[in-house]
Image (spheres, rainbow, N blue to C red):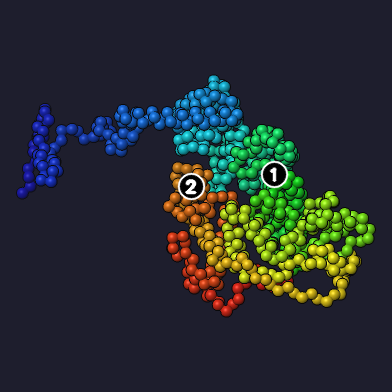
Amino acid sequence: MLQRTLGRSLPIPSTPPPVLQCTICTCRCGTVLRSNGPRTEQRRTKGGLSARRAPTTLRQAQRMEPLPLSPAQVRLRDEAAERDKSKHYRSIQQLYADGQVSMTPDAGVEFLNEFATLTAGVKGKNVVDVAKFKGLVKEYELGARDLWALAFMLLRWVEEDRALGKKLLFTLSAAGHEEATMRILNHALLGNKTQPNLLRSSEVLYARGHLREIARKGENYRAMVLEGKIAYELGDDDYAIQMWEQAMDASVAVSEEEASLKAQGTTKTTELRALHRRTERDLSELSSPWIELTMIHYERYARHWQRNGFALALAEREKARKANEIGCGQDDPTSHYHAAEFFKDYNNDGSVKHTSSWLYHMTKAAATSHVKAAHGLAEFYASSGWKYIEDEPPDHVKPTPFDSYPAPSSTTGSESNNLSSWRSLLGLDVSAPVQLDPKESMFNTAAFPSTPIARWKLAIRWLEPAIAYMYAPSYLLTAKMLLEKDLWGQAHAPGAALKLSPDRYTFASKEDYEANRPIERPAEPVRPDEPNPAYSPSEAQDWLRNIFYAAEACKRRQEYLRHAQAVIRKEHITSGEAEDFADHLPEDVSVHVRKWLQFPYVREMWEGDIDGLLKEAKEICEREGWDMYNEVGGLMYRHGLGQQRGGDTPPVTLASAMARSGR
C-alpha cells in the first residue's frame, strides 16, 4: 500500500537539535575510539571555511617559523660565528701582511658582514643592489684588488662561504670589475663541457656582454683570448681568430717582459710575482693566443685536406706554422711540442722521419715536463737505431758524426771551427765552440748516448716526468721496456762516426749524394742483439698493474660524474663542482685508483685511449700467462678467459719490430 502524503509540511524548529554525545571507548591496546555522532558545525563552504589549516600548510608554516633556540644552541651559534669571523680575520691579516691587499683585517671582516646582510634581501639572485654595494665599498674604502681578494678567499672555503663568494663575484662583475667577469666566464667555459648551453644561460648573460665590451676595447689581451675561446666553443671560428690575432702583440710583449725579468734574477722577484699574479687565477690558459691560433688553423687544415681542398689546406697549414713559430719564439713548451708533432717530416714509406728539428723541439718541450713530449722522446731513444737523426747536416755545420758526404772545399774554413766544436764536446779541445743554430747543434749532440743499453736507460729517465704526472701510456711503455730480453744491436753508433773518420761517409761528394751513388765498400757485419741487463718480468707486472688501476679510475669517475650531473639537473651544484666531485673519489676507494685523478689536465690526454691501453695490457698478460691481482689480492684479470694465448707465436718486441721496419 502506498503511503499517504502529508497534507502540510513539518514545522521548522526554532532551535538546533540537541547534540548527541560521542561514544568513547578505549581498546585494550590503548587506542581511543570515537563513534560517528552528528556534528553541530555547518558543512564547510567557500563562504564559511573552517580556520583549521591543512597538514601541508602547517608543515610549511613550521618550517618558516623556526623554534626558539635553547641557551646551549645560542652559545654554539655564537661560537661558530666567532670562529668564522676569526677565520676571515686571520686570512685577511695574512693577505695584508703579504702586501696583496690594502684593507685592514677589521675593515674586511666588517665589510663581509655588511655584504652578507645585503644578500639576505635578494634570495635566489646572485647580484645584490649595485648602488648599495658601491656605497658599501666606498664606506670601507676598498679597492678593486681588495674586493677580488675577498671573493677569491671565500670561493676556496666551505659551502656557506662559497655561496657568499659567488654572490660577491657576480656583484663585482655587475659593478664593472673585469677580473670578476673573466673568472665567471672562465668557469662557465670549463663547465660547458659537462653542462651544455651553460655559456648561453641567463646566469652569465650580463657577464658575456661585459666581457665583449672589455675585449673590443683592445686593452686586456687575456679578455680577448677568453672572448675568442667562448666564440670558438659556440662555433664562431672567424670571430675567435679575430680576437686571438688582436691579442697576439700584447701577449708577446708580456711574455718578453717575463723572460727579461727572469734573466735579471732575484733583483726582479717582486715584479715577476706581480706579473704572475695577473695570470695565476686563470682556470684555462689565457696568455698564449699563439696556441689557440695554431690549433684552430691546424684543425681547418685537416678538414680541408679530408675534403680534397688541398690549396685551402696548405694555406691553413702555413698559418698554423706561423702562429706556432711565434710561440716557439717565446720558448713555449706546448708550441715546441706542436712543432715536433704537427710539422714533422715523413719518409717515403709513411714512417716518421726523426730530424734534427724534430729532436730539438721535442727535447725543449720534454725538458719542461710536457708529458706527451717526454713520452715521445722516451719512445725515440728506446726504438731508434743508427743513424739516430735522419736529415743531412748542412755543409757549414760539418764535420759531424751524421755526415753522409764531406763538405765542399769552399767550406773548409769553417770546418776547422766545427771540428773544434765537436772536439770540445768530447773534452779534447778547450777552445770556444762556434755558434750554431740550436736545431743545427743537435748534429753534434744527438750521437750520444751511443750504445743500446745507454739509450735504453736514457729513455727510462725521460719517462720519469710523464710517470710523475700519471700519464698512463708511459706506465705501459715502461712495462714493455722491462720485458725486452734483448736490445737492438743496430742502436750502436759506428766507431768511424764517433771518431769523425772519413770511413763514415756513404757518398764521396754532394753530387753523388743527390744522384744516390754510394761508395762501393764491403758490407759491414750486422751487430747482434745484446741481452738487456734490466730485463725484469716482476717489475714489468707491477707497472702493468697500474693500467688496470687507471681503467678502474676512469670507470669510477664516469659513474660519479653521471651521479653529479643528475644533481646538476636538480640545481644543487654547478657543473664545475660536478667535475671536482668526480675527480675526488671517496676515501674508501683504493689510493692506487684515486691517484689517477690527481692531475685532471693530464688525465684528459689519455682517458680517451684507455680502452686501447687496457687491451694491450691484457694481450701482454695473455702472452706472459699472468693473472693480475690488486694490492689486497683481488682478481683484476685472469688470463686464458679472453683471447687465445697463442703459445707458439713469438712475442713482438721493440727490437724485432724495428728490424722488420728496416731501422
Q: Is residue 269 left or right of residue 186?
A: right
Query: Please, which residue is most extreme toward the top here?
Result: 139
In the rendered view, does 592 fall on the left or right side of 491? left
Q: Position of residue 450 (x, y in %)?
A: 73, 63
Residue drawn at (68%, 53%) of the image: 366
Residue at the (54%, 39%) spot, across then down: 202
Q: Nearer the viewer, mark 2 or mark 1?
A: 2
Residue 562 or 469: which is nearer the viewer?
A: 469
Which residue is depicted at the point 57% across and 28% down?
A: 97
Quadrant of res 531: bottom right
Left or right of 549 in this view: 2: left
Q: Mark 2 points at which residue?
A: 581
Q: Name, please, the residue furthest toward the bottom.
A: 648
Q: Which amino acid type is marked by label 1?
A: Pro
Give the quadrant of the C terminus. bottom right
Which of pointers 2 and 1 lies earlier in the amino acid sequence?
A: 1
Q: What residue type is labelled 2?
A: Phe
Q: Is mark 2 on a helix, strand or loop?
A: helix
Q: Say few, some or many: other residues with alpha carbon within 10 Å of mark 2 (under 14 / 14 to 19 / 20 or more).
A: some
Residue 73: give its label: none
- Residue at image point 70% right, 56% down: 341
Residue designated by label 1: 289
